[in-house]
Image: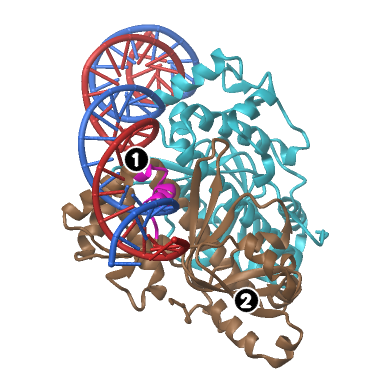
Chain colours: A cyan, B brown, C red, D blue
Amino acid sequence: MNTDRFHPLVQLIDRLSLHSSLSSEDRVSLFELPYSLKLFEAKRFLSSKGDATDHCHLLISGVAYRYSVSDEGLRQIVGIHTPGEFLDLQQLYVGTVESDVRSLIRCEVAAISHGLLRQLTEERPSIGNALFTSMLVELSIAREWMLNIGRRDARTRLAHFLCEFAFRISSRGLTFEKKYEMPMTQEQLADCFGLTAVHVNRTFKGLVRDGLVERSKNGITIPNWEALVQTAGFNDRYLTLRNRTSPQY
Amino acid sequence: MNTDRFHPLVQLIDRLSLHSSLSSEDRVSLFELPYSLKLFEAKRFLSSKGDATDHCHLLISGVAYRYSVSDEGLRQIVGIHTPGEFLDLQQLYVGTVESDVRSLIRCEVAAISHGLLRQLTEERPSIGNALFTSMLVELSIAREWMLNIGRRDARTRLAHFLCEFAFRISSRGLTFEKKYEMPMTQEQLADCFGLTAVHVNRTFKGLVRDGLVERSKNGITIPNWEALVQTAGFNDRYLTLRNRTSPQY
DNA sequence: CGGAATGTTGAACCGTTTCAAACGGAGTGG
DNA sequence: CCACTCCGTTTGAAACGGTTCAACATTCCG
């Protein structure tokens, strides 16, 4: 299970969950989100462990995706979540949630009460900072996705997504893998780019034929990273953001 | 000139710019961004008034847009900025900016030094909160745009954009206008949806033919708001977010 | 083993693009 | 005041990328 132990927010939760004083109040709890379950549904059957609607949920390990559905019933996946990202931060505020989150593989999730989260961000600026930074990165990714969906052709879209996915699941680029699990169906991929599953299939085959990616069961390998990056027009700029003052967590 | 004087951040700047103690140190300054100027370029010729790269810029009045350009030179507009939004908040952190901002009409912009902004957010949680909320709303809008670009046809995309634009330039829905200025060329509109200017033209004509919108010079009017909303599948949910604790600014 | 979900393939179709040409209005200089 | 240019809009015809539908193969999983 991929866990980004280097991520400041994940480290924070690690420490908080060990804190006996806090865990006795049951304000930070870890739980498991099985394969392909909606966070919304998970909250339901977790309500026995306390009011889950008053908690924010941080992804500790695994991968999840966020999607919306149009009036015609077409699904658009609007983002991929990797460890260190909050899945429902907007719950801190009043406002209907317009998108839902579903796990792509088995995930570990930490539930933090709104109260504790507010307290933490106000008392320790570095935590608020980390939250803010992660939000800025998500926004930056969202903008890149708009460019991907709106202005690139199918082949480039797929290649670009594969590059981003490879980069993001390798914890902060430290353990970068040329071979990784890609637990997404072609229909899910299609919903990421605004394409059809059928067309994703053909496009994928094209990339394989040209030797840019190789497919095995539940996984893909990238034999020539540079070649894929070039056909994708991929640049990892938009995926990273560091604090100027380098705070300690 | 449309100014959202109700926006908490705009109000804050109003007060700060009046504060003699602060303005003497020249840490908050208002300036004007002429028609169709890149914020980046504006910063250049403003550097005489201090180091503009160490400032964040808040939109006080007017409308601006943010765009990226693909490798093939195709432009994608990834967002519209209305009063109360920061244009370069990511500048607080290290990280190459992957998108640029350009004014759509004449804008007023407030420049706040990074130092003051950090100080404000740390000392007054309600301000940090407002910043955070505005970031969440931007993210929410970005996700809706992905759905728009990826999963709706041209007609619906245009209708949806017109609804959102109408809603956003009417300050927080208080002075909602059925007739408003639409200072965007069809090419800019096309770059918002990932379409061609030519196709936007045809699609626009279709909407006009069906009586859903009317066009005049530099402005459009919506004779039947409900009809447009329905063809757009528009719901303003994703545009608003209120703080649960209702802080005072 | 059986059924459901996912992947694969082909052919016809269609929404959008591309290219090219013409049109209109605004601004400018003679 | 006209001629000129520039920019955005408009229109048509052909081409194309991606969709749709339908059938079949394969894998997964109870």
| Magenta region includes residue B188 | yes
Look at 53% across and 30% down and name the residue there: A156
Which SS does the magenta portion mostly show? helix
Q: Which mark is residue A141?
A: none
Give coordinates of residue A188: x percent, y percent: 46, 33
Q: Determine the image quadrant of residue C24.
A: bottom left
CA gap, disc 1 and disc 2: 38 Å
Residue A135 image point, x, y percent: 61, 56
Circle 2: residue type: Ile
Residue B127 tag number: 2
The chain that hosts pointer 1 is A
Residue picked out by circle 1: A74
Residues in magenta? B184-197
- Asked if residue B235 shows in the view, the reply is no
Determine if residue B38 is in view. yes
| Label 2: few (<14), some (14–19) or many (≥20) C-alpha neighbours in 10 Å | many
